[in-house]
Image (cartoon, rainbow, N blue to C red):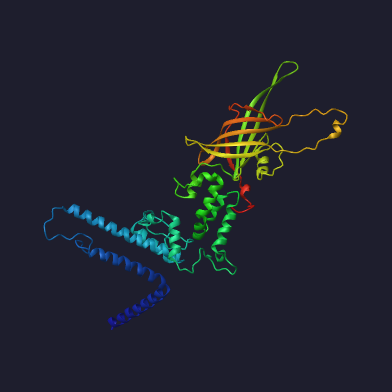
């Protein structure tokens, strides 16, 4: 009788345990399915590994039927090596699965796969190379193993063009990332988009903005690499001397690699020297003066150049040099040209002169006096500079090689030339980019 009662009590306890197990199962159904899938995958990998010839169920190598020249130490090392490779491959698979779940928004599932992968190989995160997915939408990124994609992504432009070619013909050059009610820019024809890109470059040759625009999407990247745009830019900079593309592979490469002056800023030099002053009246001391002045050179794509020498600092002068129609009286205007010498040195030669201002003649001043004719002259300055690169920036330094003043007498046509000695007073000019120079576009390229 006591045995029967104890049997009933054990059945009741088993029923309660079963009921509690069912409750816990209902609460953790989602987590149990994920763990079950992960354990099932690990079991399949271990099972396939144990089915390999020469490996027993315990993970050790089975003794061969025939005598082998290799010793047991070598065989065990091979077995351990195979196990490590299989473990690492499984860890990579779990880690990539976790990354995919994380991108899909399933963070709870991703954490579980991350844990399983790190239990197998703790440093699995550093053994996987990250790269852009070849079939992505250009916005999101995912983790893929770096095997044969390096060769395919060597030419980004060809890769983007190929992706657009493989798509349906109804797909446009660019598509909105999100659904919008208003008309998207992707609805514009290709000709209109290219015209907008020419406005971005503008007549000031703002190629920096064009490069930034190419980062929007694949379609804009292709438009920004249009050879016609870069060809016109090269013609603006070098003129007829850039008809041949050799030795460059593209017009864009020519613009980036061939020496040229820059238009999105000002070349500035600062000169400082000490000048001796007059002696005091009592003769006990003599004053010394420290003199500082700046030289500014601003180049334009149409071949014009502005030069200004003044003691005012760049903060007050640079905004006045944005356009050629400046009201600064001491400024010199002229034209420049680039010269490629035989020694592979690029030089800049410019002829500048002061702006001509017609002053009305005051006849009342000479009413009772005989007028003394004043000989009219034209003053021009000839400047020679060597274009160099300094530091990380390219073509940002101009070194003085020549400076002379030419005075032409209009009555006789004679010209008097005065050449200045290039000494320490002619300090090199360094380029400073000015964002406001390219903030507005007056006309397209």
Q: What residue is shown at x 14% (from left), y 60% (from top)?
A: 64
Q: Position of residue 1 (x, y in %)?
A: 28, 84
Placement of 182 over or under 334, stated as above or below: below
The residue lying toward the viewer, choosing from 335 and 321, is: 335
The residue lying toward the viewer, choosing from 236 and 299, is: 236
Residue found at the very far right of the displayed protein? 368
Q: Position of residue 436 (x, y in %)?
A: 63, 48
Residue found at the very far front of the displayed protein? 412
Q: How many marks?
A: 0
Q: What residue is shown at x 59% (from left), y 70% (from top)?
A: 181
Q: What residue is shown at x 53% (from left), y 47% (from top)?
A: 234
Residue found at the very far bottom of the displayed protein? 1
In the image, 45: left or right of 22? Answer: left
* Residue 101 image-quadrant placement: bottom left
Q: Position of residue 416 (x, y in %)?
A: 65, 27
In the image, 282: left or right of 290? Answer: right
In the image, 437: left or right of 58? Answer: right
Q: Position of residue 264 (x, y in %)?
A: 59, 45
């Amino acid at each position: 009788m006591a045995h029967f009662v104890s049997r009933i009590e054990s059945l009741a306890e088993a029923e309660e345990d079963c009921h509690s197990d069912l409750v816990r199962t209902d609460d953790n159904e989602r987590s149990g399915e994920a763990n079950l899938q992960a354990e099932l995958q690990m079991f399949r990998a271990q099972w396939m590994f144990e089915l390999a010839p020469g490996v027993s169920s315990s993970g050790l190598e089975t003794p061969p039927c025939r005598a082998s020249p290799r010793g047991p130490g070598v065989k065990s090392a091979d077995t351990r090596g195979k196990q490590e490779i299989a473990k690492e491959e499984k860890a990579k698979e779990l880690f990539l699965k976790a990354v995919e779940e994380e991108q899909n928004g399933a963070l709870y599932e991703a954490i579980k796969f991350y844990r399983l992968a790190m239990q197998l190989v703790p440093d699995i995160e550093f053994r996987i190379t990250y790269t852009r997915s070849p079939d992505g939408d250009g916005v999101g990124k995912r983790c893929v193993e770096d095997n044969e994609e390096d060769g395919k992504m060597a030419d980004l432009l060809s890769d983007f063009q190929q992706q657009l070619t493989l798509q349906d013909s109804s797909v446009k050059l660019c598509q909105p990332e999100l659904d919008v009610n208003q008309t998207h820019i992707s609805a514009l024809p290709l000709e209109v988009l290219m015209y907008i890109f020419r406005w971005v470059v503008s007549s000031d040759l703002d190629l920096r903005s064009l490069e930034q625009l190419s980062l929007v999407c694949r379609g804009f990247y292709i438009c920004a690499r249009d050879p016609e745009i870069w060809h016109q830019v090269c013609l603006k900079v070098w003129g007829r001397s850039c008809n041949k593309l050799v030795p460059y592979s593209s017009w864009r490469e020519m613009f980036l690699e061939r020496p040229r002056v820059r238009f999105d800023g000002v070349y500035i030099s600062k000169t400082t020297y000490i000048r001796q002053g007059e002696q005091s009246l009592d003769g006990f001391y003599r004053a010394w003066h420290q003199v500082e002045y700046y030289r500014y050179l601003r180049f334009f794509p149409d071949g014009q150049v502005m030069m200004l020498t003044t003691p005012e600092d760049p903060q007050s002068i640079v905004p006045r040099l944005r356009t050629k129609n400046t009201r600064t009286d001491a400024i010199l205007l002229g034209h420049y040209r680039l010269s490629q010498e035989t020694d592979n040195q690029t030089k800049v030669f410019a002829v500048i002169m002061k702006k001509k201002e017609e002053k009305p003649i005051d006849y009342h001043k000479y009413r009772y006096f005989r007028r003394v004719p004043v000989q009219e002259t034209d003053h021009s300055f000839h400047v020679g500079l060597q274009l160099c690169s300094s530091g990380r920036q390219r073509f940002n330094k101009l070194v003085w090689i020549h400076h002379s003043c030419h005075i032409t007498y209009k009555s006789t046509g004679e010209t008097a030339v005065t050449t200045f000695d290039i000494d320490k007073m002619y300090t090199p000019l360094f380029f400073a980019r000015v964002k406001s120079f390219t903030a507005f576009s007056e006309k397209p390229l």
